Image (spheres, rainbow, N blue to C red):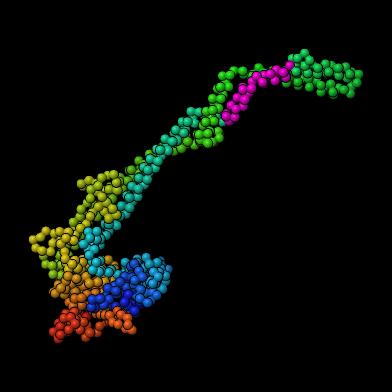
Amino acid sequence: MLTSLLIRNFALIEEIRIDIGPGLTVMTGETGAGKSIVVDALGLVLGERADTTMVRQGSDRAMVEAELDAESLAHLRPMVEAMDAEWLPVLILRREVSVKGNSRAFVNDTPVPVSALHELGNRLVDIHGQHEHQSLLRAETHRVVLDSDPVVTLALASYQELYSAFVASVQELEDARRTRDRIDERRLVAEHQLREITLVNPGAGEDEAIEQELKVVEHSEKLATAANEIVTLLYDGEQNVVDMLGRSEKLLADIARIDGSVDALQREVGSATTGLAEIARTVRDYLERIDFAPDRAEQLRHRLAEITDLKRKYRMALPELLDKKESLAAELAGLDSIDDRIESLERQCETLRAKTTTASKALSAERRKASESLGQQIVSALKDLGIKNARFETRLDVTPVTTADRRWLQADGGPVHCDEFGWDSVEFYLSTNLGEEPKPLAKVVSGGEVSRIMLAIKSIFAGRDGIPIMVFDEVDVGVSGGIARKVGEAMRKLARAHQIVAITHLPQIAGVGSAHLKVEKNVRNGRTATRVIALSAEDRVHEIARLLSGEKITDAALQSARELIVPPAA
């Protein structure tokens, strides 16, 4: 319950403290006195958007502080403590806005983001203004009303659990298909590259081997000439080295027979002779292997060009190319597994689609049951509010879709659009005149009828939404006379489940309040300021009389005012 509202330097308000009790508190005042300023201040402390025009002229900052009795708000304790704020018997929300545009928010004196105030505000206060209650005319709000039925809420929760899994599965499938598209492109590239490398099919170190062989083939004549000369010098010439060493060895043998000290030298010369003879034979073999065929050189040049072009194209050395060939083959083998994954995801997606379809059918069935009950209750409530011949219907429709978007469900008529709220579009239809067919709400109601329909719905769902405080800002526009009294009685009845603040200009509604506040403007020290006064019993009579007769209050108006006031115990 909201116990007090402190407003400082906000618009025309210098400083006021408004104490608010349980039940229905009515607030009246002349046009322009500042009644809506109080509502705007409450909206600010509940996290609504701020701007510098809210700051009273000549002040540095505006401040609004709301105190609430936390005893009945225990369900909000985890949220408050998650903001690092201390849970206390009194829940204090504060908002400050500076003239420079800076905004600060506090919960029990702990700084919090403005969004935290907004989140708390959504669970604490439901503000209906002259514009806000018109949201009832928008079809998108009708589903919210219908889904507040407890049975529908449970069916919706069951559906949403399956829908979330279904949407995740569809997204995973779409991602896999996009991956496959990329894989198909990659596969074409990888297959082409593997084909190119395999076509050349270079061996390890082949480029270096070719370069070496090509160098030999290209210089075969020079090599043959040199090798032939070596063989001649060492072995084949008339004066060759092997023969001369052989004669030298024989001479040393003769010396050794006389002087044994040269035995070692003779053996060394013998070894040299044998070694040089072996060298000569090896060079002769080398000479015989030299290929003078020009075709071989051309073959080698062509092969080397193939390998060189491949290395240049991929900007890789031969070892890197060979590694790439292996990795391409492995990659192509792995790419094939995506098709198996897509098939698995398609099966999963269809299974979840079927389950989600079943849940959506169940949700739709519960909505139809709830809509029948809602229609009967609204017709009854509207009758109490003076609309005696009302016919109220809730129509549920589906939107067919093509299967191009995979987020669809299979209704009896084929694929239909779905979202996190099922496949139903919900719209209220109403007829307020006998013999007229129901039409969409927006096309048949006046401002006064919207107010009564809204009150009827709020009366039916009182206590379900868990929001303890409701503010009605002149939602009684278009209502007068005996109907106004019925609207007031409906508000008073609604106040059994909610704390209600109703800003009104109708004496019939002002008379049913359990407390009465008056908003007025006065001039002090050359400045206009708004203040809020809690009226005594007698002051209340005069204020309601003013609403009845204007500035000139007559005895008849005073008597009528007394008759309009409902005693607190009623």
409 or 300, which lies in front?
300
Residue at the image point whose x is 80% and y is 20% from the top: 270
Q: Position of residue 248 (x, y in %)?
A: 83, 18
The residue sitting at 24% across, 66% down in the picture is 131
* Quadrant hosting residue 267: top right
Viewer-proximal residue, 245 or 173?
245
Residue 194 visible in the current orientation: yes
* Vertical side of 239 occupied by 410: above or below: below
Question: How many marks do you count on the picture?
Answer: 0
- Single out the residue that lies furthest toward the left: 435
Left or right, 116 with respect to 434, comes to right
> Residue 452: image x %, image y %?
18, 68
Q: Does the image show residue 566?
A: no
Q: Main secondary structure of the magenta part?
A: helix
Q: In this rendered view, identify the residue nearer to me: 495 or 297.
A: 297
Residue 288 in picture, x, y percent from top left: 65, 17
On whether residue 229 falls in the magenta region, the answer is yes
Residue in view at x 31 percent, y 70 percent: 43
Q: Which residues are magenta?
A: 205-232
Q: Is residue 31 magenta?
A: no
Relative vertical location of residue 426 with respect to residue 529 in this rendering, above or below: above
| Screen quadrant of the C terminus | bottom left
